[in-house]
Amino acid sequence: MQKCRGVDVGWGCSYRELEKFGESLRTEGLPGVGKLAPMDRIDALTLFDEMDAEPVSARRGARYPLVRRVVPDEAFPEEIGGATNFVSGKFVVSISNRTYQGLSVGEARARWTVVHEFGHTRLHPDVLVTRATLPHISQAALRRGDADHKIYRDSEWQCDSLTAALLMPLSALLDLRESGTLDEAVLVRQFGVSYEAAAYRIDNLRRGALT
Ligand SMILES: [Zn+2]
């Protein structure tokens, strides 16, 4: 069973809804990256560099600027490459220097981190405005059972599901399956994801969770 790593955002989301949202973000265009066809790989370095080009829309028509920061590696625990906060009327997307270096060489984990943090600004802007921060709850806290809401209401589950949908769009997966060429290696090569992320995505597709 999956454990909740984030906060209860107050509403539930299905994989299918997150697939649709991810697809709409890709087809409407990402900051700096523009509109994407199903088989296009997201240029995560450009996405990060241009993320501050447009404000983030929140509830009741409010729009807030976004600033991006590269912070020293020591700012985050080892397993965390980035964070998104709401500070002084601005969304702040921070990534570690190690993550930024990883982007320039197309490292899968760095790419995932940037798309994930971007995802928070589109998926949970109002939650961020209210709470100021979305904690990435540590493994130790999980063992204590601190996070006990439903997984589909969890900020991290929702955002990781959206990240997978953005990086490996469902329409591309269906085309690859149709042509008999869908496997982990193809997704790793085509979309710059880790083998584990590709395997998890294929597993979700096979068990009918996405369609
Ligand atoms: Zn997160």
Image (tube, rainbow, N blue to C red):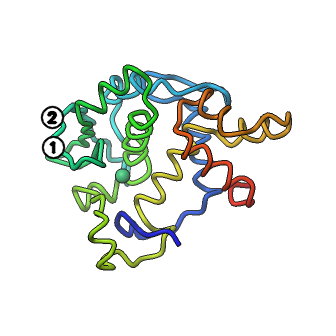
| Secondary structure category for the residue under label 1 | helix
The x, y position of residue 71, in whole percent, is 17, 34
Q: Using the image, determine if residue 66 lies above or below residue 34.
A: below
Residue 70: image x %, image y %?
21, 31
Would you identify the image quadrant in which residue 145 lies? bottom left
**Mark 2 residue element:** loop
**Mark 1: amino acid:** Ala
Q: Residues within 10 Å of mark 1 (few under 14, many from 20)?
A: some
Position of 150 with respect to 114 (left or right) is right
Looking at the image, residue 82 sits to the left or right of residue 192; the answer is left
Determine whether the beta carbon of the residue marked 2 sits less than 8 angstroms from the nearest atom of ligand 1: no
Give coordinates of residue 100: x percent, y percent. Answer: 30, 28
Q: Residue at x 61, y 32 (%)?
A: 27
User: Looking at the picture, does residue 137 appear above or below residue 31?
Assistant: below
Do callouts 1 and 2 mark residues in contact (Cβ within 8 Å)?
Answer: yes
Instruction: Say whether residue 11 is visible.
Output: no
Numbered badge on residue 41: none
Q: 122 above or below 70?
A: below
Q: Is residue 44 left or right of residue 147?
A: right
The C terminus lies in quadrant: bottom right
Q: At 39% across and 23% down in the image, what residue appears? A: 45
Numbered label tally: 2
Judging by the rendered image, the residue that carries numbered circle 1 is: 75
* Residue at screen point 15% across, 43% down: 75
C-alpha separation, residue under disc 1 versus residue under disc 2: 6 Å
Q: Amino acid at mark 2?
A: Pro
The residue that disc 2 covers is 72
Give percent across and percent down for residue 174.
77, 41
Vertically, is 203 above or below 175?
A: below
Quarter-of-image position of residue 148: bottom left
User: How many neighbours does mark 2 have within 10 angstroms: few (below 14), some (14-19), or many (20 or more)?
Assistant: few
